[in-house]
Image (cartoon, rainbow, N blue to C red):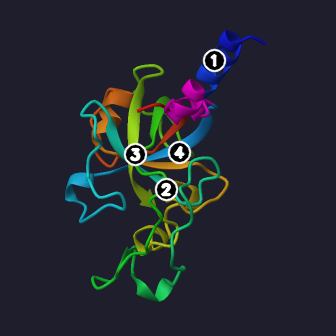
Amino acid sequence: MGFQSIWVVFSFIAYASSRPQSSSVSYQQFTAVATFNNYATQGNTVCGPKAPSNPLYFGAAAGDLSANISGGRCSGSIDMSVCQGQSPAPSYQGPSCPKSNCGLCYQVTNIGPYGNTAPTPSTGSASIVVQIIDSCPASSAFNFCKSDVPADERCGSSATNSLDIDIGAYQALTGAAWNNSPNLHVMIQPVVC
């Protein structure tokens, strides 16, 4: 092997190891349930900002029990004594959550209504991009106190990928404004932000 061949191999290795790792995103698709939240009225989020870095994206929280999109389990445990009906007591402090998936992006495609809900208006298979700005912890009383809501629709099931998406995305996914509307069955795929 001549000097030029060695230099070319060394240059390629140096180039490949210095490239950003955005190409390491797995592009596998997963099914999920999309629930909806008004982040503008929420006190805080795990990741800090209440909105994604790109104004064309929608903010979302990944369920901490989600098999394929969780950033890790949040602290805390389910303690029904903090519930006052379907909501936590006013003095309730939520769990602490890891920030490992803050800023990740997913393409979300509406594939229809979720569970035993009435059909939702649809623009076909409309897609949006969400950026993770929060976590949706199963150990949060804001979720587990909703005992009249199935666990898979309140970030409480490890068998379901859960995305809690900003309510503004509902219209982009269905063509109808969100008004305590039913949850959606969606396909999600990691994408580079």
Q: Are marks 2 and 4 in contact (CB under 8 Å)?
A: no
Nearer the observer: mark 4 or 3; the answer is 3
Q: Position of residue 153 (x, y in %)?
A: 52, 55
Whether residue 55 appears in magenta in the rendering, the answer is no
**Does residue 168 sit above or below 147 in this rendering?**
above
Q: Could you give the CA–CA distance between mark 2 and mark 4, rounded to whole angstroms?
A: 21 Å
Residue position for label 1: 7
- Assign the magenta stretch its main secondary structure: helix
Q: Residue 15 is drawn in which quadrant?
A: top right
Q: Amino acid at mark 2?
A: Ser
Mark pair 3, 2: CA separation: 9 Å
* CA separation in Å, label 4 and label 3: 20 Å
Mark 2 or mark 4, whichever is nearer to me: 2
- Amino acid marked by disc 3: Gly
Cα–Cα span, label 1 and label 3:
38 Å
Residue lying at 69% horizontally and 18% vertically, measured from the top left: 6
Q: CA distance from mark 2 to mark 1?
A: 38 Å
Q: Residue at x 51, y 69 (%)?
A: 74
Q: CA distance from mark 4 to mark 1?
A: 51 Å
Question: Which kind of residue does numbered mark 4 sit on?
Answer: Val
> Which callout, 2 or 1, points to the residue nearer the camera?
1
Point out the stretch of residues depicted in magenta.
Answer: 14-27
Which mark is first along the chain, 1 or 2?
A: 1
Label 1: few (<14), some or many (≥20) within 10 Å? few
